[in-house]
Amino acid sequence: MTKVNICGIDFKNPVIAASGTFGFGEEFSKYFDVSRLGGISSKGLTLNPKEGNDGARVFEVTGGMMNSVGLQNPGVKEFIKKELPKMKKIDTVCIVNLGGSCEDDYLRGMELLENTDADMIELNISCPNVKHGGMAFGIKSEVAYNVVSQVRKVCTKPLMVKLSPNAEDIVDMAVKCEEAGADAISLVNTFKGMAIDIKKKKPIFDNISAGLSGRAIKPIALRMVYEVCKNVSVPVVGMGGIYTAEDAIEFIMAGAFAVQVGTANFIKPDICIDIINGIEKFLDEEGIKHIENIRGIL
């Protein structure tokens, strides 16, 4: 009823834990049986270990949260050695999220991951490109096309590219990534925002801006997913403010093959199970035999 296939990989259901909100999966195992998830997208990895940003990292706002974690992670080699084996023990699809600060970082990281049993790669192009003034790879379509096409040359695994909503043209970005060899598209990452401490008279975050996620972004994320689904032929995974089964079903009706749940995990650690159960209940009550029957139904 809820099984979906993306890039030749079977997911038992369309609910995936989003990168950066679920660690490497094991962290949530004390709250629920994480093998019930359709998949897990790992914490964002970079070639070398990163300590992350200084100062405040998370700040609650109306309708969501802001974060400036800075991709703190153990690095690809340490992940492969210590974390990937534990992820693979979980009976669900293992998606590895890979970022980088320059093209070479992406390529070297991908070369290392290529020789592992990870099921799928999610390429995070929201990272700042240090060789081009810090502008994210995912802002300009031609820059994204270049990095995706280069990674494609060394990646034989299913390659999903995660798009930033801050792109100059999200639809053109998706089309260019497909042309560059992406097997799937996921969107959206966080929106660029800002918060100010009026008592201290300075920004909350040391980096001034930070990523906004949560319920507040859902209507915009949903619109972007709908538009991208209408313009690409590869599977799309939607995310952005999904807290309920109804939210997830909206994204699927907009054309998404699956959804990722992120910020909601911080509010209720087992919320993905609520969403999975809610989707199953909806299909049963509506007499819908399979979730594919409502995908892109609009």
Image (spheres, rainbow, N blue to C red):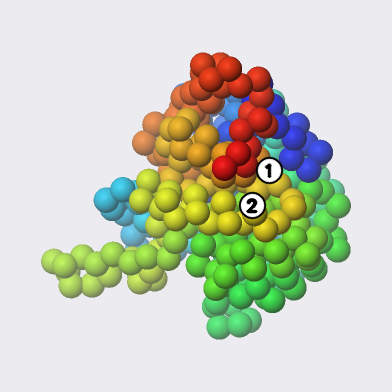
- Which residue in the rendered view is the most extreme toward the left? 199
Q: Residue at x 53, y 20 (%)?
A: 286
Closer to the camera in the image, 250 or 70: 250
Comparing marks 1 and 2, which lies closer to the viewer?
2
Pointer 1 or 2: first along the chain: 1
List x then y, in percent, for residue 4: 70, 32
List x then y, in percent, for residue 83: 65, 40
In the rendered structure, the answer to whether residue 134 lies left or right of residue 112 reads: left
| Three-letter amino acid code at the position of disc 1 | Ile
Closer to the camera in the image, 105 or 11: 11
Residue 1's place in the image compared with 296, above or below, is above
List x then y, in percent, for residue 209: 38, 69
Q: Residue at x 75, y 60 (%)?
A: 178
Q: Please tell me in which quadrant of the rendered image residue 146 appears.
A: bottom right
Q: Quadrant of the C terminus?
A: top right
Badge 1 marks a residue whose secondary structure is strand
Q: Residue at x 45, y 32 (%)?
A: 246
List x then y, in percent, for residue 41: 62, 43
Q: Residue at x 18, y 72 (%)?
A: 201
| Three-letter amino acid code at the position of disc 2 | Cys
Q: Which mark is residue 229?
A: 2
Q: Quadrant of the N terminus?
A: top right
- Which residue in the rendered view is the most extreme toward the front? 298
Q: Which mark is residue 95?
A: 1
Badge 2 marks a residue whose secondary structure is helix
Question: Looking at the image, can residue 9 be seen?
Answer: yes
- Callout 2: 10 Å neighbours few (<14), some, many (20+)? many
Whole-angstrom CA distance, mark 1 to mark 2, is: 21 Å
Question: Looking at the image, can residue 122 be seen?
Answer: no
Q: Please tell me in which quadrant of the rendered image residue 25 appears.
A: top right
